[in-house]
Structures are given as structure tokens and as C-alpha cells.
Image (cartoon, grey):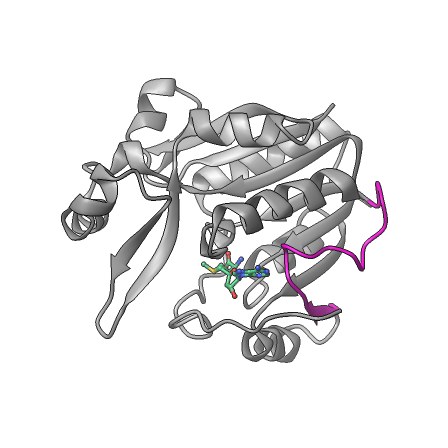
Amino acid sequence: MQTTPISVPGSVGDFDRKTLFAHERAAIEVGFSIIGSGSGARVLDMGCGRGRTTAVLVDEYRANVQAFDIDPAIVAEAARLRPDIGFRVDDATKLEGYGDEAFDMVCFPFNGIDYIPDRSAREACYAGVARVLRQGGVFVYSSHNRRALLANKDARRIFRHNLWRLLTKADMLYEPGRMWALPLWHGTPEAEATMLSKVGLEQVAVWSRRRDAPTEDPTAARREHWPYYVAVKR
Ligand SMILES: C[S@@+](CC[C@H](N)C(=O)[O-])C[C@H]1O[C@@H](n2cnc3c(N)ncnc32)[C@H](O)[C@@H]1O
């Protein structure tokens, strides 16, 4: 499959956490409860990076996981860390290599979907996810929330750096880094629900963190810079 390599600053080195985030675990567990169980579930882990979530899905939940990332360097790193798991280079906006209804769950963890550079490519990603999920299958992912840009120090830096883009309702906001700014989609929980519904996915849960404990409280979602979403294919 043809892919367009992109360079995600720090993608090999920075995301070396091995455990799940609290609200990420809550969302994954809701997903497994909807499809029945993790054990033997056919899971596609998109934007897998160094395989942080892939390893947990395989080791803890006993899922049958296929994993890919668009960045060949990070895929090589994932394969070095876990040679027993088959990692591939692929693009989440072009899922032609995967069959219709081939998966019970698709994951795009830790805001990987927000690196997709524009709205039409993001819509192509949702459409591909809907196609490869079986009826009743679940999509679990997180995405930046522009409603929460005053919630913490990191979010406030993005807010200050993007006043004009916020005023003009630009989809992509720039996260200022040491060397350059990284464009990241910033939506809202409501806009996510609308985009999902256009391809037959229903948003059924939004998970946030409160003092690092997971919560489904909608007031917490307004203050969560990157909520985790669970959507079901109807
Ligand atoms: C923030 S990292 C998260 C990595 C890993 N999932 C984790 O949670 O540790 C986002 C990942 O998404 C990948 N990515 C971005 N756009 C992608 C695309 N179109 N297809 C596949 N992977 C993509 C990046 O290369 C990067 O590894």
C-alpha cells in the first residue's frame, strides 16, 4: 500500500510511556464490553507509534491485534521492541489493504488522528474505519478539544499561540515546540459526534480525567484537552 511518510517531531523518542492513560483504559474497556470481550477480538491499532497500546492490547486483553503507523522509523522501533507482533507501515486515511467488516475494534490512540493534515483526509479516515468495522464494532480514539484550551498549562500555550486561528475557526491549531510548531486538529465532542454520524458511527461515550481518574461527567469533558471517544458502528 502506498503511504506518505510524514515527520512527527519526537515521534520515536517522546512517546515511550508503557502504560495506558486512565481515561484511555476506561474507553478501551467500554469498547471491549460492547463487543463482548478483549480475548480474541480482532483489533486494528492505527498510529501505533512504538506499540505502547498494541502491547497492552496483546498482553493484557489477549486481543488479536494488527498495528501500523505511517512513520517507518517508529514502526522499525516498535518491531525492535516487540518482534513477536507484526507492525506495518500504513496510512490511516487509506485503509484499502483491510477487508470490509474485518475488525471488532479499531483504535487510534493518543490523538494520532489529529496529525491528519486536513478535514477531507480526516473524513476519509472515519469512512475507512466505518468500512473495516463489523456491525456493532467499536472505534476508540482520542482527539484534541478546543473547548478546553484554558484547562491547563499546555492547553493555554496552544490558546495563546493560535488566537487568530481560533477566531477564524481553523481546524488545525499549532502546538508550539522548541524548534517548530506542530499542526494538530482541534475539534469538540459535539463536532466529533457529527463527523462520526456521517459514516454510520454513533458516539456512545466520552471519557475525561479528573485528578487523573477517569470520568464520563460532561462537565469534565469541557475541561479535558483530549477526551477519549467510543463510537459504535450501527
Ligand atoms: C502521539 S503519537 C501516538 C503513538 C502511539 N499510538 C501511542 O499512543 O503511544 C501519534 C502517532 O500517529 C501516527 N500517525 C499520524 N498520522 C498517521 C496516519 N495518517 N496513519 C497512521 N499513523 C499516523 C504518528 O506517526 C505517531 O506515531
Q: Main secondary structure of the magenta part?
A: loop
Q: Residue at x 64, y 38 (%)?
A: 139
Q: Residue at x 63, y 80 (%)?
A: 80
Q: Is residue 104 above or below residue 193?
A: below
Indicate the quadrant where residue 178 lies.
bottom left
Residue 209 horizontal side relative to residue 125, left or right: left
Q: Position of residue 82 (x, y in %)?
A: 66, 72
The stretch in magenta equals: 85-102
Q: Is residue 225 left or right of residue 233?
A: left
Q: Relative to residue 27, is residue 93 depicted above or below? A: below
Which corner quadrant holds the C terminus?
top right
| Residue at (63, 56) in percent of width and height | 92
Between residues 208 and 165, which one lies in front from this camera angle? Answer: 165
What percent of the width, then of the height, locates residue 7? 46, 73
- Residue sitting at x 28%, y 30%: 223
State yes or no: residue 135 in magenta. Answer: no
Query: How many labels were placed on the picture?
Result: 0
Quadrant of the image containing the N terminus: bottom right
State the residue lying farthest toward the top: 218
Within the image, what quadrant is residue 147 found in? Answer: top left
Residue closest to the eye, 23 or 71 = 71
Give x and y (percent) for residue 141.
54, 42
Q: Position of residue 191 (x, y in %)?
A: 45, 29
Can you tell which quarter of the image residue 188 is in? Answer: top left
Residue 211 in view in this figure = no
Q: Nearer the viewer, residue 215 or 158?
A: 158
Is residue 119 left or right of 30 when viewed as pictured? left
Q: Can see residue 85?
A: yes
